[in-house]
Image: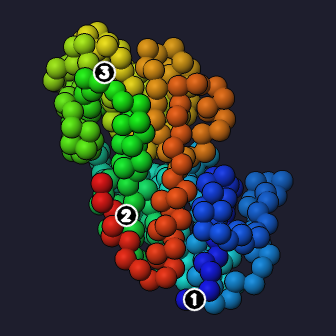
Amino acid sequence: MADNPLLISGRSNVRLAKGIAERMGVSPTKCDIVNFSDGEIFCQILENIRGGDVFIIQSTCPPVNDYLMELLIITDAVKRASARRITAVIPYFGYARQDRKVQSRTPITARLVADLVVQAGADRALFLDLHAGQIQGFFDKPVDHLYGTPLIVEAIKKNGYEDLVMVSPDAGGVERARVYAKSLNCGLGIIDKRREGKNLAKAMNIIGDVRDKNVMIVDDMVDTAGTLTEGVNALIEAGAKTVQACCSHAVLSGKAIDRLNSSPITKLYCTNSIDQTEHAKRCAKIESLDIAPLFAEAVDRIHHEKSVSSLFEY
């Protein structure tokens, strides 16, 4: 495949798609996506893509069902236009938290979505920081899984925090926090929390020394920010000097922005896997980091059949 890769953007994160295209020195393939008055989505590829290596860039962020359906429709259109290979580039994978049965008679929706993407026609998939690593196995096609850790670590180093402690917001995220702590050569802590309902958590105890420390909470995503702000309050009560946070995916749904603005948290580092333009206008604490160079490099290597394993390293 000596020709250039063909990039097609859905409507979920046009800025990121343009950034990837600019980084690669190519123009996005023209595509017309509109909604009918009843909400149905229509897609038409406006250029010849027969025999092409197509990369569809679409995060399944809120409104998640609309953007997921849009991804499937674009994929079907590309398949019927006789593309040689289709790669679903999904920087943020919605439904990733439903990766197992936690109660009786509940679905494993992450697997369902994986099946939908494959059945729509995707030949492979490219992700950033999946909520659970085992989701890679839900796809019956090749999967490449990128990490935002190096980008976030460099941003933290640039600000030069002293007496830094990385804190996991729960026991399940300890390994993630440990990777950051090792990279930054700093301390490690854990918040012992009890979940009282969906999108509702209560912080209980702080494990580790955070008194008079600059604390950085590490998570893979921030949704309603309830867990995050509860943890921030607990850390301040435990004597932390300042509290920041970092995550790969800032969903920031519901009252998240209001909670961040009223919280003593001073900064939230995140990637632009979800477009933060509107959120940043309402909350000055958000610092969005650009993943376009990382994805551009991954797309280029996949297109030219080169190894992408070096991009997986923390």
Which of the 4 image quarters holds residue 81?
Answer: bottom right
How many C-alpha atoms fall within 10 Å of the one at disc 2: few (<14), some, or many (≥20)? some
Query: Along the horizontal axis of the image, is 84 left or right of 98?
Result: right
Q: Residue at x 84, y 53 (%)?
A: 37
Which of disc 1 and disc 2 is earlier in sequence? 1
Out of 259 and 298, give the one closest to the viewer: 298
**Residue in view at x 47 percent, y 76 percent:** 302
Q: Relative to 162, is 21 on the left or the right?
A: right
The local secondary structure at tag 3 comes to strand
- Which disc, if any, is residue 263? none
Say if mark 2 contacts mark 1, CB within 8 Å.
no
According to the picture, the residue beneath numbered tag 1 turns out to be: 2
What is the three-letter code of the residue carrying label 1?
A: Ala
**How many angstroms separate mark 2 from mark 1 (CA)?**
22 Å
Residue 139, how many percent across, how many down?
A: 39, 70
Residue highlighted by disc 2:
311
Crowdedness of circle 1 by 10 Å Cα count: few (<14), some, many (20+)? few
Q: Earlier in the sequence, mark 2 or mark 3?
A: 3
Query: What whole-number distance in Å separates the C-alpha atoms at marks 2 and 3?
Result: 30 Å
Mark 2, secondary structure of its residue = helix
Q: Is residue 23 above or below residue 168?
A: below
Foreground pick, 87 / 122: 87
Q: Give the amino acid at mark 2.
A: Leu
The residue type indicated by label 3 comes to Asn
Query: Which residue lies under the disc numbered 3?
Result: 214
Q: Quadrant of residue 54?
A: bottom right
Q: Nearer the viewer, residue 110 or 178?
A: 178
Q: Is residue 27 above or below residue 250?
A: below
Q: Position of residue 203 (x, y in %)?
A: 28, 21
